[in-house]
Amino acid sequence: MITDSKLAKEIIARRVAKELKDGQLVNLGIGLPTLVASYVPKEMQITFQSENGIVGMGPKAESGEEDSDLINAGGQCVTVMPEGSFFDSSMSFALIRGGHVDVTVLGALEVDEEGNLANWIVPGKMVPGMGGAMDLVIGAKVVIIAMQHTGKGKPKILKKCTLPLTAKAQVNLIVTELCVIDVTAKGLVLKEIHKDTTLDEIKSVTEAHLIIPDNIKIMDV
């Protein structure tokens, strides 16, 4: 088990970055997904979008170089590439709802065997609003969930989501610090595992049934 939360998030972000391809328009959700921008090779031409109105977003701003007027959807200070542009929310969501986003990377509270996603509310808790997640998971061509494998010691990959859904059957790939899981019509297929874990450990912290092929790879991080 990888107990260092900072290391876990780095592993996840590094692995998600390897899913991205030259020329893609990629949306990064708030929290952990924003780290992905820091691990894309410099020679790759990936254009990052933030739904508050940026295309051409760069990595998180270094300490001491923050500009409080230049933030992502989560309120973090970020950088912008030379070709970057800014626009209002209506244009931003026209890009998303119009199917122009190739990949969205989002965090999650729960994901289940059918690719259902719950990531916007815990009943009884105060939340700022649903944000753009509902639009992103429907509008993006590929939905990648980047999250730690458990939350407060409890599985987050379930047989059936218990929290209110963000969207039904829209998740394509799940990346945690322990493994990479493909969401298919037949169920959740375990593609890769981290070198510091085992199949038994992954099963013990996963409620959902996992389809385990013969050719599982070691995560490339």
Image (cartoon, rainbow, N blue to C red):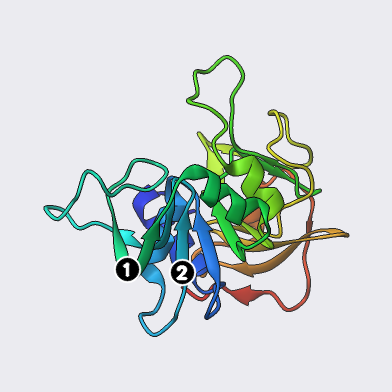
The residue carrying mark 1 is: 81
Q: Is residue 44 above or below residue 100?
A: below
Q: Position of residue 116 (x, y in %)?
A: 75, 44
**Which residue bears the numbered disc 2?**
47
Which of the 4 image quarters holds residue 142?
Answer: bottom right
Q: Can residue 201 be seen? A: no
Work out whether residue 104 or residue 93 is closer to the camera in this orientation and state it. Answer: 93
Tag 2 secondary structure: strand
On residue 201, the disc is: none
Residue farthest to the bottom, as pictured: 43
Residue 103 picture location, percent across and down: 60, 63
Instruction: Rate crowding at label 2 as few (under 14), some (14 to 19) or many (20 or more) other CA atoms within 10 Å.
Output: many
Instruction: Name the residue type under label 1.
Output: Met
Q: Which residue is more in the foreground, 99 or 40?
A: 99
Counting from the top left corner in percent of width and height, residue 204 is at: 65, 47
| Label 2, label 1: how far apart the Cα atoms are | 9 Å
Give coordinates of residue 18: x percent, y percent: 51, 74
Query: Residue, x 32% and y 62% (percent of image)?
Result: 59
Residue 157 relative to residue 218: left or right: right
Observer-nearest residue: 4 or 29? 29
Indicate whether 206 appears above or below 18.
above
Give the residue type at disc 2: Thr
